[in-house]
Amino acid sequence: MAARKRRTAGYARVSTGSDEQFTSYEAQIDYYTKYIQNNPEWEFVRVYTDEGISATNTRHRQGFNQMVADALAGEIDLIVTKSVSRFARNTVDSLTAIRTLKEKGVEVYFEKENIWTFDSKGELLLTIMSSLAQEESRSISENVTWGQRKRFADGKVSLPYKQFLGYEKGEDDIPVVVEDEAKIVRRIFALFMAGKTPYQIAKMLTADGIPTPAGKTKWGTTTISSILTNEKYKGAALLQKKFTVDFLEKKMKVNEGEVPQYYIEESHQPIIDPAEFDKVQAEFARRKGLGHRYSGGSIFASRIVCADCGAFYGPKVWHSNSKYRRVIWQCNEKFSGEKKCATPHLREEDIQARFLAAFNKLLGSKDALLEDCRLMQTALTDCSAIDAELDGLLQEIEVVTELTQRCIQENAQSAQSQEEYTERYNGYVARYEKAKARADALQEQKKQRQAKADAIGGFMFELSERGDAINEFDERLWLAVVEKATAYHDGRLVFRFQNGSEIES
């Protein structure tokens, strides 16, 4: 009987999607197709491929995984590939796959190294070559990381332009504004400051058929939020927000001080005025403090408070189906409690008129108010006491971490009373958690102080820009200067401004 031909498949992969690599990719497919078909002892199955995918991990390589699955299903007897580094640069993944295939009677041939995995020397050679390939990946990763950090240290800004709205790569790698896209960015910021939530903005852009930065048709809340909080839109750049913790898994981690960060002012042309950007961040902080109570239906949402129950006022429509239709604002919990709130409803035109009257009263003592605001800003931004306590806590965390590691090592190296070990270990953990919780609280306190300082800065800007009394309601002014307005049952409306001033109107 004639010997059955070995069913043979090829595997080809290139690690980037560039034109040069594409030529190599096509050449590999053509080469292995002819190479297998020209061997009279082999029966060609197919060439499995992965294009533009790194080899350090096989988890996301569809062609590779499909090839292994087909081999385990009995459809392949032999796999031919260019080299160990083309197969996998992760020693564990490489050996695991080969041993799994070997158990099913499937051999792998590495042409460059002339390694046959059924050969008695094959696995030893393969282990050595895979380890070398893995170390090559580590070296490449470290070189790339060093290059990126050197660019960061030099203040060079690099953006993912294909998925970054509003900028394109210009000369000397400096971001250049794309005006058509910049209009969308400005619209997003304007809508947010008009009271809309990221969810509402996403729905509006999707309904208008505007593509996302990635070219998709549906906008997401996280995309809107990331645009609103990205400092690059004000012409600055915080570099190295994340870093790679595992070159094999390509895992990224938010940088919390493990590696240096660099903040570059005026690194490129802004799309959003820096003062406007800071107002948006202050508004973000304000809404976060409100929790789920914030509603983005109007600029008055979550800013008018009922003095009777503390709930927010919300819009209500009267005579919705008649010519007398109008929108009024009243306490959202007016009829919820045992006793109905006595605070009256308010018309939007009344709120606007009373706000203008209150703000014009402020203008009468503008100079004194601005001086008070400067003193408040200085006090809020002086975080020297907080920073000193944070330094002590970070030292405590570092010491406790070292003690914990030493405790674990001692327990692993020598016999100990496990009760004493557990007690000592839990004590270190408790110390660590206490210090970490306090450090987190202080960081949050710094953020809140900065947000309040920014809000006062916005208030100062609007106050200093106004000379004479104003006669027309300005939504931007309202959002920048009003912290809240409290409605009382006797009809009074007391405005509390960002600097703490309260004026009845």
Image (cartoon, rainbow, N blue to C red):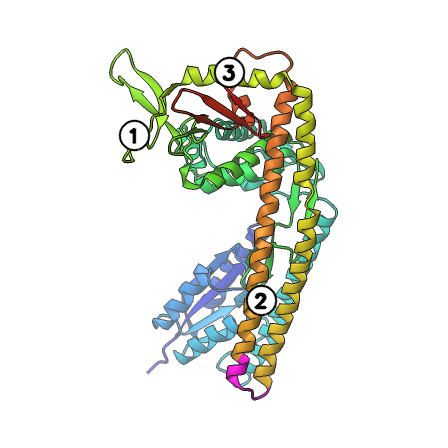
Separation of residues labelled 1 and 3 (CA atoms): 32 Å
Looking at the image, which residue is at 53% across and 34% down?
A: 283
Q: Which quadrant would residue 371 be assigned to in this image?
A: top right
Q: Is residue 222 or residue 345 the one in the foreground? A: 345
Q: Is residue 435 or residue 188 the one in the foreground? A: 435
Q: Is residue 15 in view? A: no
Which class describes the residues within 10 Å of circle 3: few (<14), some (14-19), or many (20+)? Answer: some
**Residue 418 falls within the magenta-colored stretch:** yes
- Say if 128 sits above or below 495 in the image: below
Q: Is residue 405 in view? A: yes
Q: Amino acid at mark 3?
A: Phe
Residue at the farthest right position: 154
- Say if 453 sits above or below 460 in the image: below
- Residue 196 lies, in percent from the top left, at 45, 30
- Residue 460 lies, in percent from the top left, at 64, 26
Residue 473: mark = 3
Disc 1 vs disc 3: which is toward the camera? Answer: 1
Residue beneath disc 1: 340
Looking at the image, which residue is at 55% across and 33% down?
A: 280
Where disc 1 sits, the SS reads loop
Tag 2 and tag 3, C-beta contact below 8 Å: no
Separation of residues labelled 1 and 2 (CA atoms): 50 Å
Of label 2 and label 3, which has the lower sequence position? Answer: 2
Number of callouts in the render?
3
Where disc 2 sits, the SS reads helix
**Residue 212 falls within the magenta-colored stretch:** no
Looking at the image, which residue is at 67% across and 25% down?
A: 370
Residue beneath disc 2: 431
- Residue 316 lies, in percent from the top left, at 32, 24
Q: Which residues are magenta?
A: 414-421
Disc 2 vs disc 3: which is toward the camera? Answer: 2
Which class describes the residues within 10 Å of circle 1: few (<14), some (14-19), or many (20+)? Answer: few
